[in-house]
Amino acid sequence: MGDIVPEQRLRKTTEFGTDYDPHFWHDVNLFAMAIELAGQEFSTKFPNSKNYIDSATVSYTKSLYSIESYVRSEMAKIPDSSRVLITAHDAFGYYGKAFDIEVKGVQGISTASDISIRGITELTDFIVSRNIPSIFVENSVSEKNINSVVEGCKSKGLTLKIGGPLFSDGLGDAQSGAETYINMIKKNTNTIVGGLSK
């Protein structure tokens, strides 16, 4: 679906051959746009099912705009001083831009990338200087680098809590509370707000 999202709405990156961060679904408005455009394409390709496709598209996008309002309302609970989302890898850039929160990934956009000792030191200095309360693990990424950051902060006198997991690269299983797109967005938001609003 990323192919039907206008390029000017995508985040540039040098990490992938496409030059764009693929995690656009974390911007609910952008995902809704993709659903609407996909619905139009399906209606054209399957004219016998046009009424059903159009109705389903309208119904689902209404649900998406409703969850976007929920996210905005919940994110407003995070104090300005704590509006920094630090995750295992840089998958939440679209979320940050959409919902006005600074985002830093311990790793880059790809989960295959690694972080240097210098990178961990710079990140721990940043966290301590801003007194960030929580850092977040992800369901699809090793906790090793997160634990290194927590230990680095501890050595500098800051007890950094581990929040999560966040669902960054896919949905969760049936027991996760993140088994659908809307539930995943809601679950991630509740986890982020819970970790940063204390």
Image (spheres, rainbow, N blue to C red):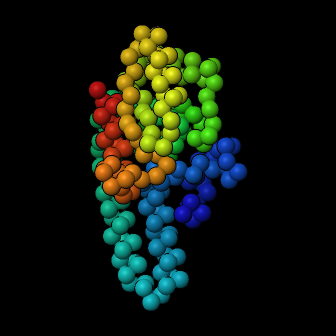
Most distant residue in the bottom direction: 48
Q: Is residue 78 above or below residue 30?
A: above
For residue 187, side relative to residue 31 (left or right): left
| Location of residue 196 in the rendering, given as x and y in whole percent from the top left corner | 34, 30
- Which residue is at a point 47% across and 81% down the rendered structure image? 43
Q: Is residue 179 above or below residue 188?
A: below
Residue 100 in which image quadrant = top left
| Location of residue 108 in the rendering, given as x and y in whole percent from the top left corner | 60, 37
- Which residue is at a point 39% across and 72% down the rendered structure image? 57
In the depicted view, which residue is nearer to us: 194 or 4? 194
Q: In which quarter of the image is the N terminus?
A: bottom right
For residue 21, side relative to residue 189 (left or right): right
| Location of residue 16 in the rendering, given as x and y in whole percent from the top left corner | 67, 48
- Which residue is at a point 38% across and 84% down the rendered structure image? 51
| Location of residue 175 in the rendering, given as x and y in whole percent from the top left corner | 30, 51
Q: Can residue 68 be seen in this view?
A: no
- Which residue is at a point 62% across and 32% down the rendered structure image? 114
Q: In this view, does 99 lie above or below 50?
A: above
Q: Is residue 152 visible?
A: yes
